[in-house]
């Protein structure tokens, strides 16, 4: 049964005092103030959090209280003395069953801390899809899966790219009936504290895309070259496939089960990063409701990028082809 197990308990660490600013409404013109590392907003709803973030507030500094009237002495989030991260005292729990698919290739340094941090923010099962990483990520994944009942592993024989790894993960998820299926990089580029927002928004959208390029979205620590490459890539895709999606290549997403089952996944061709574009394009061709939610994207600190020339060439050639095709509905 998906999500039947509790997520890992909070670590026993010394906690720091956070000063909260209760916010009960956001006027159209409010520009949120800059907050210090020990300061945060507390809001009573996801909707209010979204209004703050769209206006420029940092999603890491917003506590969603899950109560009607947030008080100044709010205690529902905590912050470890040694870290800058605000975390809910109890991870968010949603009614629908959730599987987070983490594709890994040589992510040994990132995997365990990410699994732990996800567990502090959200009750969800995790599937690690490892392509026989030479650095032993697969063995570490097995160890984590023995320690935590909510962690599962799919081993694949060799590295075939992001597309086949995700498709393997989706088939695993659909066979087990998960209602929401999340994609997330295993390198801390996608923030675990943004997960509950993504899940909440999927209540009204078939596909929620964590977007860097809508108001409130941002990229952090990226080199100018890497930022330019991403922006050019998105501009290229928008030219062929439409401007109403701002971040076609984003890899932080939440799909509803029903959308994935209607998508003819066996027909998806993409191997590299154009996989994200093809999935978005297919969803739109099927008339799915696609929504972009602003997120913060940060460059990886540990490990190496797998973005290569082959993947770029695939994007350049496949996108124009997609623009000339339509998908027959089932
Ligand atoms: N299983 C599997 N995972 C992969 C493969 N290629 C990349 N990944 C994983 O997919 C995620 C995204 O890959 P990254 O190398 O971070 O690529 P990126 O985020 O687009 O690029 P950077 O911004 O440079 O980090 C990471 O968790 C990788 O470990 C693959 O062929 N197989
Ligand atoms: Mg990355």
Image (spheres, helix red, strand yellow):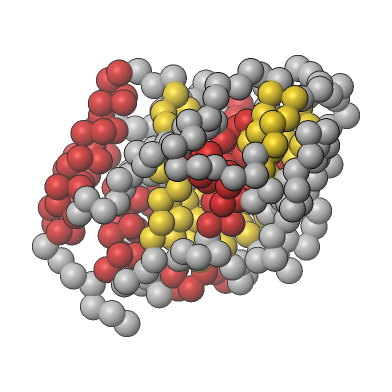
- Residue at x-position 65% and y-position 66%: 96
Up-down: is 259 above or below 120?
below
Q: Which of 30 and 86 is in front in this view?
A: 30
Picture coordinates of residue 134, whole percent (x, y): 52, 32
Q: Nearer the viewer, residue 269 or 274?
A: 274
Quadrant into which the C terminus falls: bottom left
Q: Residue 254 in the image: state x and y as whole percent.
A: 50, 56
Q: Relative to 256, is 116 above or below?
A: above
Position of residue 289 in the picture relative to residue 156 (left or right): left
Q: Can residue 113 be seen in this view?
A: no
| Quadrant of res 119 | top right
Quadrant hosting residue 42 = top right
> Residue at coordinates 69% horizontally, 60% vertically from top-left?
94
Residue at 66% x, 19% y: name it.
37
Query: Is residue 25 in view from this perspective?
Result: yes
Count all numbered tags in the image, as a single digit: 0
Horizontal and vertical percent position of residue 60: 60, 32
What quarter of the picture does the N terminus occupy?
bottom right
Q: Nearer the viewer, residue 203 or 146?
A: 203
- Pick whichever, 278 or 222, lies toward us: 222
Q: Is residue 204 left or right of residue 281?
A: right
Residue at x-position 52% and y-position 69%:
257
Looking at the image, residue 330 sits to the left or right of residue 22; the answer is left
Image height of 270 relative to 265, above or below: above
- In percent of width and height, residue 313 lies at 19, 39
């Amino acid at each position: 049964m998906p999500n039947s197990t509790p997520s890992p308990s909070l670590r026993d660490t010394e906690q720091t005092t956070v000063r909260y600013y209760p916010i009960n409404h956001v006027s159209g013109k409010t520009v949120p103030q800059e907050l210090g590392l020990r300061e945060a907003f507390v809001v009573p709803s996801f909707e209010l959090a979204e209004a703050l973030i769209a206006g420029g507030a940092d999603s890491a500094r917003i506590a969603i209280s899950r109560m009607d009237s947030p008080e100044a002495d709010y205690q529902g989030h905590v912050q470890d003395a040694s870290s800058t991260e605000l975390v809910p005292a109890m991870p968010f729990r949603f009614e629908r069953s959730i599987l987070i698919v983490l594709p890994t290739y040589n992510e040994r340094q990132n995997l365990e801390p990410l699994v732990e941090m996800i567990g502090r923010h959200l009750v969800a099962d995790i599937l690690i899809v490892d392509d026989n990483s030479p650095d032993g990520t697969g063995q570490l994944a097995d160890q984590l899966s023995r320690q935590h009942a909510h962690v599962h592993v799919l081993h694949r024989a060799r590295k075939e790219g992001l597309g086949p790894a995700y498709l393997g993960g989706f088939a695993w998820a659909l066979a087990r009936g998960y209602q929401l299926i999340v994609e997330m990089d295993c390198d801390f580029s996608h923030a675990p504290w943004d997960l509950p927002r993504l899940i909440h928004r999927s209540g009204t959208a078939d596909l929620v895309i964590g977007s860097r390029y809508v108001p409130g979205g941002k990229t952090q620590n990226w080199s100018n070259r890497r930022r330019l490459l991403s922006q050019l890539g998105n501009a290229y895709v928008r030219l062929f496939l439409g401007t109403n999606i701002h971040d076609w290549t984003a890899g932080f997403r939440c799909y509803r089960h029903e959308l994935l089952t209607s998508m003819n996944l066996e027909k998806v061709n993409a191997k590299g990063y154009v996989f994200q574009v093809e999935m978005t394009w297919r969803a739109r061709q099927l008339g799915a409701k696609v929504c972009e939610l602003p997120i913060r994207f940060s460059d990886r600190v540990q490990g190496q990028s797998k973005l290569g020339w082959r993947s770029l060439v695939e994007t350049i050639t496949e996108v124009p082809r997609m623009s000339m095709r339509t998908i027959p509905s089932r």
